[in-house]
Amino acid sequence: RQKHRTSRRSEMTSSRTRRRLTPGFYSCGEDPPGSYSIFVRFMPDGNTIVIACERMLIVRDIPTGAVVRERIGAHDTAIRGIAMAPNGRQLATAAFDMTARLWDAETLECVVVLWGHTDAVNSVLYSADGCTVATGGGDGTMRLWRAVDGKPLFVLRCPDLEWPISLHFAPGESRLLATGFGESSGDDGIWEWTLPAPPAQSVVSAPHDAAAPGAAVELEGRRLWPANTGIEAHGLSVSPNCRWICTFNNEGAVFLYDLAENGSLIQAHKMAEKESKLSHSYAWFSPDSRRVAFLTEAFIKIRDTATGALCLLLNGYWNEINEVTFSMDGRQLATCDKRNNVIIHTICSWTS
């Protein structure tokens, strides 16, 4: 194994640092490792991270690992997703308690509770301008909210979408894409909605107990992909710019596709061969969509989306990874594993 690692060294970055952080929740003895998922987001300053674990929110200082602030009982049930507003002043969480919540990032005070979903809320996302929050729930709907006060804007439905997993605003925010499971086929797919322009609002922090009143406009979407492509796909991941799709098949191969607006696909790169032992059928993109990370065997591989070249290889990941998160500038990388560890990597240089 040492020989294998040495042969890969030329493909890694010139240097990197690792710092291991633990959420600090299971150390109380209430939950064993792996009993819940943890999620991490970088603050825009790159010096602090927000960790969501079970029903807690924890802000940690990256250089020291010290807890800056925390919120116990942020939700009534386990948190399923977290998003950071582009300006770093607000963050959003989604949970099994059928709500999403907006928080003041500085104080971790709840700004507003978003009610409307009738099942667990699985995902949450801010638009690029920070004015709109999108949520996806187990009730098969996506909902858009005004970030300044939580006012419901749109309810997005599609007859064939049963369980949305991730949400993506297309550039210009005229479209919303969602990955999830189809109701009739049960397979992975991508759905699309064309969005009217909501009124422009800036993100501020003002305390509210519930979303501002108002009826949301209902919009019908369509299944964008697959549409009789014959492509076997599991664990679909979409890049932030909605151009790239990373897919996995049952034989362990990883493919990257270029997605056109009409839903047609062009295979761009084969990211891993069939004999690769994939530990997780999901991929994570950098904020600028230039790089994609996925887990194979005990390695996290990060490849360039334009060329397919391997630009970073992180070894020693024997525990299953819940999530890989890039900082907003792409210079730091956080990983969360099943043993409730968070590891921060500082990227000194990319090979491509």
Image (cartoon, rainbow, N blue to C red):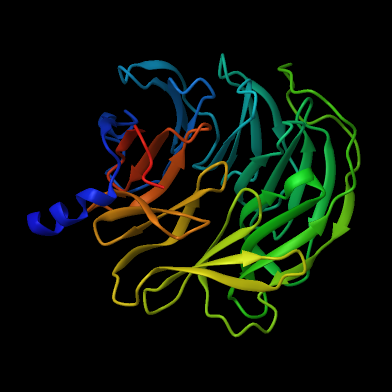
Given residues 225 and 103, the one toward you in this image is 225
Q: Quadrant of residue 207?
A: top right
Q: Name the image quarter holding the N terminus.
A: bottom left
Q: Residue 342 at x, y = what percent? A: 33, 36
Quadrant hosting residue 223? bottom right
Residue 153 % position (x, y): 85, 41
Which of these two is toward me, 18 or 8? 8
The one nearer the camera, 67 or 299, is 299
Task: Decide: is 229 above or below 121.
Answer: below
- Viewer can see residue 315: no
Placement of 70 over or under 346, stated as above or below: above
All told, the count of numbered labels is 0
Q: Position of residue 24 (x, y in %)?
A: 31, 28
Q: Position of residue 202 (x, y in %)?
A: 79, 23
Q: Is residue 40 visible?
A: yes
Position of 87 with respect to 193 (left or right) is left
Of 185 and 192, nearer the camera is 192
Q: Is residue 297 above or below residue 338?
A: below
Residue at x 56%, y 47% (from the top left corner): 96
Residue under the image location 53 percent in, 32 percent down = 328
Give the residue drawn at x 90%, y 33%: 199
